[in-house]
Image (cartoon, helix red, strand yellow):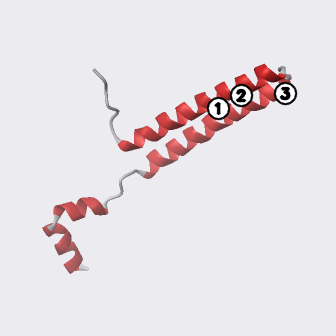
Amino acid sequence: MKLALYLFSLFPTLALAAQPAFSVQGLISALIYLVVVSLIFWLVWWFIGYVGVPEPFNKVLRVIVGLVALLILIYFLLQFIGPMPTMR
């Protein structure tokens, strides 16, 4: 055990690599956010079908809801890669 600690102290990059990249609290809050957003979009999707919107408008509304949900999911996943790049 002491040998492993000694080796980690010799190579600081290995010691940093051994630490977790995400905190548990951050992952739990991200999971709760994802569940709440998905429930909201599922409710909107269900409501569009329940109201009985005529067929062409029904399909258009569902495509719009799907695209908005996809954009929110992409934005959510991009937070895990680091700071957002800015365009000048």
Q: Are marks 1 and 3 in contact (CB under 8 Å)?
A: no
Q: Bin the neighbour count of mark 2 within 10 Å (Cα to Cα): few under 14, some 14-19, many 20 and up.
A: some
Query: Label 2's element?
Result: helix
Separation (CA) of disc 2 from disc 1: 6 Å
Separation (CA) of disc 1 from disc 3: 17 Å
Q: Quadrant of residue 6?
A: bottom left
Q: Is residue 55 above or below residue 20?
A: above
Mark linked to residue 62: 2
The percent coordinates of residue 30 (x first, y second) are 50, 42
Q: Amino acid at mark 3?
A: Tyr
Q: Amino acid at mark 2?
A: Arg
Residue found at x 75% / y 26%:
59
Indicate which label's residue lies in the foreground, 1 or 3.
1
Give the labeled residue for mark 3.
Answer: 50
Name the image quarter holding the N terminus: bottom left
Q: Nearer the viewer, residue 18 or 1?
A: 18
Query: Label 1's element?
Result: helix
Q: Nearer the viewer, residue 3 or 72?
A: 72
Query: Label 3's element?
Result: helix
- Circle nearer the N terminus (3, 2): 3
Name the image quarter holding the C terminus: top left
Separation (CA) of disc 3 from disc 2: 12 Å
